[in-house]
Image (cartoon, helix red, strand yellow):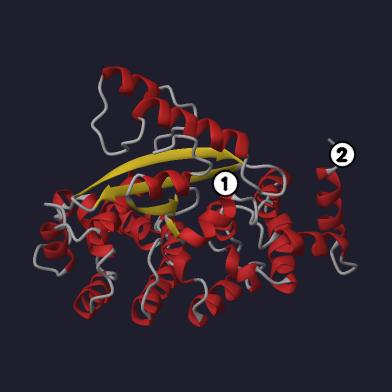
Amino acid sequence: MALAMRTISELLKTSGSQYRIYDIGRKVDKLSKETFTKVEANQLPYPFPSQGHAYIAIAFWQKKNTQPYLWFVKFPLDERGLLNLVARDHFIAIIIEALGSDLAISPNERQEELLKSNPYHFTPPQYKLAYLNSSISTEVKHESSQFFSGALRYLSGDDTWESWQTVGVQGLNDFAVRLSEKTNQKILVNALPNIPGPVLQPLCSALENVKLPVDVIDQLITQFEHSVECTNNRQKSDQSFILRSLSSSCEHPHVIRFIHSLIENSSQIPLSEELVIVLAGRCWQVISNEQQLMAFLETLISNHEVEVFQAIFKDLVAIPAIRPLIFQCMRSPNRSAKLSKAIGLLFQR
């Protein structure tokens, strides 16, 4: 095998690996091989930038051995969201120097040292790693983890709702990746009104990566609305997690209507800082037209400090699908004086 590899895709294909590419910057999103190839060729901006970088998980395995290997790679992006190809090429050179032509070997001490010195490596948060493990296990048709049965038993109501301490986060993620099964959908709809925050929050962190069926969407929206009505601070803290759980279902009409109503009613029920961060960082597809984006920006500047506005504005403008709409809003004659001033402050530094 010639070791002058031009792309990561070529490196994986030439090694005979089966592979999957995931974005894990905002949530866990599978990137198609076609999209990733175009990103590597600078034909497309990276679709899910986070803090000026592409956060990527590469899972690969051999046909003869389905035990997957995982690389976590962080590459810088330019101001247009295009991949820094110098960094990509350096990463490939490090891998080839460490492993040569066989990506599936168990590295020796020297090779391990070379891999650990990789400046593009990062360690993802545990909740994303848990979902990724569950998702890849289903891809390669491995059994669920030892924690799945306990999570399923708890969510089915077989134990008391107060006995949540025995529920493993990995088991909740195993459940989330199996939500296409009708039985599991019914179990979740029945469980959501009962489960306490310590289970609801990690469960929602798993659900944010899943396209949800309508019954689950409606139950989650109902639970969000109940939390708005309550005065319990702990239950109010669940709101941002429930909103996160809907983020992979943002194209569903019920989610679109719900989020639009949150923005429209924010003068009566202000959106917390946590909620506007989730809306911008994970649910931005719902505000991907000029009217809704303008309404969101007006809500943002009306209810939050200018520093919060600036941070979220800079995050949104980096998203390829939102960037042109942001510029339209900046030029709009309909923007308020307060929004105009906040935008002007962005360019005074």
x, y percent for residue 96: 41, 31
**Vertical comparison of 109 with 67: above or below:** above
User: Dot 1: few (<14), some (14–19), or many (≥20) neighbours within 10 Å?
Assistant: many
* Crowd around label 2: few <14 · some 14–19 · many ≥20 (10 Å): few
x and y, in percent, of residue 137 in the image: 23, 56
| Residue at 59% in and 67% down | 285
Q: Which amino acid does the dot numbered 1 rest on?
A: Ser
Q: Residue furthest right?
A: 333
In the picture of the structure, the residue carrying the numbered disc 2 is 348
Q: Is residue 103 left or right of residue 149?
A: right
Q: How many marks?
A: 2
Which residue sits at x=39%, y=50%? 13
User: Residue visible at 84% across and 65% down?
Assistant: 335
Q: Up-down: is 165 above or below 178?
A: above
Which of disc 2 and disc 1 is earlier in sequence?
Answer: 1
Residue 110 is left or right of residue 155, and the answer is right
Instruction: Give the quadrant of residue 215.
Output: bottom left
Q: What is the number of the mark on residue 16?
A: none
Quarter placement of the N terminus = top left
The residue lying toward the viewer, choosing from 65 and 238, is: 65
Which of pointers 1 and 2 indicates the residue nearer the eye? Answer: 1
The residue furthest front is: 1
At which x and y percent is residue 195?
25, 63
Q: In the current view of this chain or complex, which residue is farthest to the left?
A: 158
Image x and y of residue 294, in percent: 75, 66
> What is the quadrant of the C terminus in the image?
top right
**Numbered mark located on residue 50 in the image:** 1
Q: Viewer-proximal residue, 303 or 138?
A: 138
